Amino acid sequence: MFKRLSEDIAAIRERDPAARGNWEVLTCYPGLHALFLHRIAHRCWTGGYLWLGRWLSAWTRFLTGIEIHPGATIGRRVFIDHGLGVVIGETAEVGDDCTIYQGVTLGGTSLDGGKRHPTLHRGVVVGAGAKVLGPFVVGENARVGSNAVVVREVPPGATAIGIPARIISEGVAQRREQNAARMGFSAYAVTRDADDPLSIALHGLIDHTAELTAKVEAMAAALDAIGACPDDCKDEAHFDARRLNEMVD
């Protein structure tokens, strides 16, 4: 257990630029405290001491603001940053080297027994306020953007953003990770160019419509100049692309 605690401290110092020393991490990071206490509660739960596991989990929530069901499975070197409001359900599985920010819920969408909560594979980052709901898999090294609501599987290496979450292809996600690396730090699973894919599509359609409108107006003007433009061709219907783009933003 103490070896895993040492691993956790090292992982926090590696991923959090605000961490200035081992003692500070050990004494001031509620995510570390919650994971340490969860391991004890999880042993009680798997050993058949169900009430004791829940009691320890309740006290952990009181002390840290982080609620982890004692039945949840948490891997090695997991970093819960800030942590306030994090909720991890009974059948959730969090793989090694995952990072979870404040306000995250790994929840279920069914009242039936069995597997109800998500499985995060190795290296997943879940941004602040995100909700991952259901018994599906978030693939290795995937990213879930801040405040996203994920209700279906996320492929390895992909990025999920929006409500409900939409998947950005692996190539786009890798490019954004490279941009984040050049910036030096990629917090909360998003970078400053991480536009919603639906927003990108709408902007593209608006710009394309504006180009077509301009061409039609030019054709109408040319026909009018030679007296070949019918009366209804002269009706001007102004297309305000700038205003529509602002509405999409």
Image (cartoon, rainbow, N blue to C red):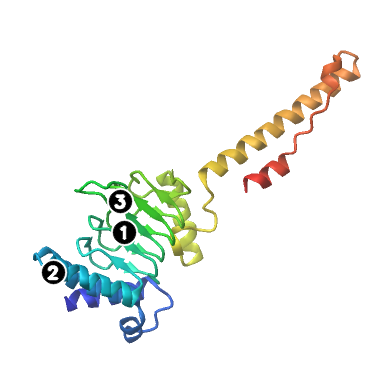
According to the picture, the residue beneath numbered tag 1 turns out to be 123
Q: Nearer the viewer, residue 170 or 93?
A: 93
Q: Position of residue 218 (x, y in %)?
A: 81, 26
Q: Is residue 93 above or below residue 81?
A: above
> Circle 1 sits in a helix, a strand or a loop, which is it?
loop
> On the image, numbered disc 3 is attached to which residue?
108
Q: Examine the rendered structure and indicate whether residue 189 appears above or below residue 116.
A: below
User: Which residue occupies the extreme bottom position in the image?
Assistant: 23
Residue at 54% from the left image edge and 54% from the top image edge: 193
Residue 147 position within the rendered picture, expressed as x and y whole percent measured from the top left = 46, 56
At 51% from the left and 53% from the top, the residue drawn is 194
State the image coordinates of residue 46 (x, y, percent, origin top left): 12, 63
Left/right of residue 128 with respect to residue 213 in the rendered view? left
Residue on which the image places disc 2: 44
Quarter of the image where the N terminus is located: bottom left
Query: Do labels 3 and 2 touch, CB within 8 Å?
Result: no
Q: Give the mark, 2 or 1, whose residue is nearer the N terminus.
A: 2
Marker count (numbered): 3
Q: Quadrant of residue 67?
A: bottom left
Query: Callout 3 environment at 10 Å: few (<14), some (14 to 19), or many (20+)?
Result: many
Give the mark nearer the N terminus: 1 vs 3: 3
Q: Which residue does the image show at 42% across and 56% down from the upper left?
A: 130
Quick check: marks 2 and 1 in contact, CB under 8 Å?
Answer: no
Say which amino acid is labelled 2: Cys
Q: Name the residue nearer the viewer: 165 or 156.
A: 165
